[in-house]
Amino acid sequence: MKIKFLGATGQVTGSGYFLEAGGLKILVDCGMFQERDFVYRNWNHFPVPPGKIDYILLTHVHLDHSGLIPKLVKEGFSGDILTTPASKEMFPIVLLDSARIQEEDAAFKKKRHKKEGRKGPYPEIPLYTVRDARLCLPLLKEIPYKYPIDLNNSVKVCFHEAGHILGSAMIEIIVHDQNERKNIIFSGDIGQWDKPLIKDPTLFDKADYVVMESTYGDRNHDNPQEVDKKLCTVVNETVRAGGNVLIPTFAIERAQELLFHFSRLVREDKIPYLMIFLDSPMAVEITKVFQHFKKFLDKETLDLFREGQSPFDFPGLRLVESSEASKAINQIRGPAVIMAGSGMITGGRIKHHLIRNITRPESTLLFVGYQAAGTLGRLILDGKPKVRIHGQFYPVKMRIEEILGFSAHAGKDDLIRWLDNFKHPPRRIFLTHGEEKPIKSLSDYIRSKKGWKVSTPEYQEEFEL
């Protein structure tokens, strides 16, 4: 059994792990690289011949885990893509949207570069097209949680709740090889405990090998009970100043969790009546999927539905899908809350709203999720005084705030809680999906406090298991 690390090594995007076991070639996740220093990898030939891969096992549909699948299919992959029922329903929403953005960005860059008389660092063509994304859909096969299936006579796979976003999974692969049974667990992205909307992460008591995320391996999040208080403060102070609250929003889970909190603040009269826009066609579609898969939601959210208080329907909420309706938001007078993608301000409608607000000291840019190194969101969060948006530079004058309690990722204590449940030391833990500092912090803890064997793989590094 061998594993090769094709991404999320020393960074948090590009998740991809190539496992050779029991006569099969299995790819766990096939994510897009989103950090500026690693974007070029998206354009490279895939490190493994796509036509020789038997299965893709998908932990969840965030683009840093799924975003290169259409390119892989275009290059020859034709096997099954196994994922959970909710992820299967969200996959076309997310990947077709990504493909449309690829096409629009390529056309926009080509037009801009021609006007400026220059060429950009990447081809002025889409990474993949809507047609490429559609070719993935017949390959999707859904696997319910806790339902082991045989991939062949030697390899079995089982999906478990990850608590990260709707449909997210931890993947356990069990291999019977030469009269020996081994199992390897891919944590995917581990969620937090005791949060609304999504159920808690699965705990395991044994594993031979573990591939584990470490996004927040060096710090914890805000207390969940403080989220409403901080959100209320940001909104009320911005309203008094006469500005808008802009929230770069991930369409899956983050948008729905924000709606949950805003619905509570509105119903409890903790913020004044104002327009609250969810300006994201994809987030609107994903919200419908949440309503379809209520059985996978947390008890707290299910109770609200039973009481007739849907967190996705409250006074002042406007769900925006068309580009015309999005542009019309700019004509509204008076303060408003505008949630729009993308979550790291790497594209999407949030950039257009940002252009109109970034020089306004009375407006607030509120970050509620991880900002990968090199993204526009990270540059602003790190205090860059001037940033480039759509080819022009703008001074950052608006107020910048951050609430970490919204993160869909486990903080350090939650990661340790997940590890503490193992009754026996795994043969080796591989830490991935984290930048250098959090990976080092978590690996040092595991070595010093538990004495377990830990590896922090490099890009395309291979290990015999």
Image (tube, rainbow, N blue to C red):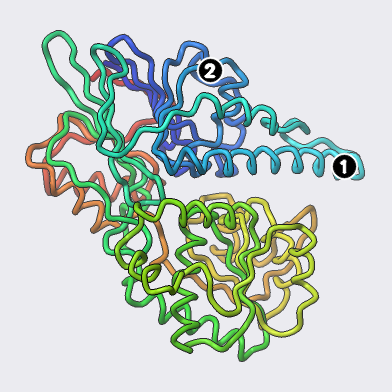
Residue hosting label 2: 77
Residue hosting label 1: 111
Viewer-side residue, 347 vs 359? 347
- Tags 1 and 2 touching, CB below 8 Å: no
Residue type at mark 1: give it.
Answer: Lys
Residue type at mark 2: give it.
Answer: Phe
**Circle 2 SS class:** loop
Residue drawn at x 36%, y 66% is 301
Where in the figure is residue 464, as x and y percent of width and height?
A: 26, 17
State the mark number for residue 198: none
Residue 458, compared with residue 2, is above or below; it is below
Viewer-side residue, 217 vs 282? 282
Residue drawn at x 59%, y 39% is 95
Where in the figure is residue 387, as x and y percent of width and height?
A: 69, 60
Where in the figure is residue 82, as x and y percent of width and height?
A: 41, 29
Q: In which quadrant will I find the C terminus? A: top left
Q: Is residue 423 left or right of residue 120?
A: left
**Dot placed on the residue nearer the N-terminal end, 1 or 2:** 2
